[in-house]
Image: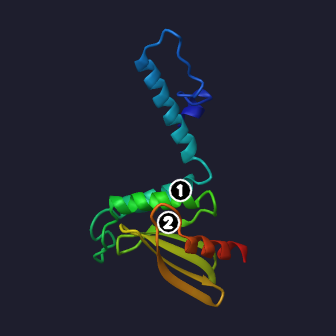
Amino acid sequence: MNATIAFGRPFFASDFSASPGTSSEAGSVRRHLQELHQAFVDAESLHGAATREMQDAFLDCREENWDGYDASPVSDTTFLRAREFLSQILPRFPAPTASAAPGGSLVFEWFVSPRRRFLASIGEDERVAFAGVFGSDPIHGTTTFNRDIPPEIIQHLVRLFLS
């Protein structure tokens, strides 16, 4: 049972207010409760499912040999890079599915049809491997992801969804 069902609204609702005589510690607790509330709201947002799926793939594949065939673990660094990549992609494009690859990377896939799909693989380093099929035109390559989504990735996603 969640807090909304139990109390009609979240028990840490953002309208919680402190009196003028409240200590700074109470103000800190109030801010923490507001942040917690916002985290719950964000987790249930339109993009929450994509974020949870990526987190689940990471948690399921953190150990060596997670697939029973000597797969490399997905590292914390890979997870953080993939999370940054996803946070920049979600406002611009439909949410991808997420999975782990045996080499230790996290993979995002956008699927329109069997002949129209695009994948991006995020690992520990700054390289992003990608592959796609656009009808009878397959593509693949690598690019660099530092702080911004590489233009090649954006171009391929635009092609996938707008052509």
As measured in the structure, the alpha-carbon distance from the residue carrying label 1 to the one carrying label 2 is 13 Å
Residue lying at the far bottom in this picture: please name it: 136
Check disc 1 and give the amino acid type. Answer: Ser
Residue lying at the far top in this picture: please name it: 21
Q: Position of residue 23 (x, y in %)?
A: 43, 14
How many marks on residues? 2
Task: Please name the residue that numbered disc 1 is placed on.
Answer: 87
Packing grade of label 1 (10 A; few <14, some 14-19, many >=20) is some
Q: Quadrant of residue 137 in the image? A: bottom right
Q: In the structure shown, which secondary structural element does the residue marked by tag 1 occupy?
A: helix
Q: Nearer the viewer, residue 5 or 141?
A: 141
Q: Nearer the viewer, residue 128 or 65?
A: 128
- Quadrant in which the C terminus is drawn: bottom right
Task: Please name the residue that numbered disc 2 is placed on.
Answer: 98
146 left or right of 64 in image: right
> Sequence-wise, which precedes: disc 1 or disc 2?
1
Residue lying at the far right in this picture: please name it: 163
Q: Quadrant of residue 42 in the image? A: top right
Residue drawn where x is 35% and y is 70% of the image:
104
Check disc 2 and give the amino acid type. Answer: Ala
Relative to 13, residue 124 above or below: below
55 left or right of 43 in image: left
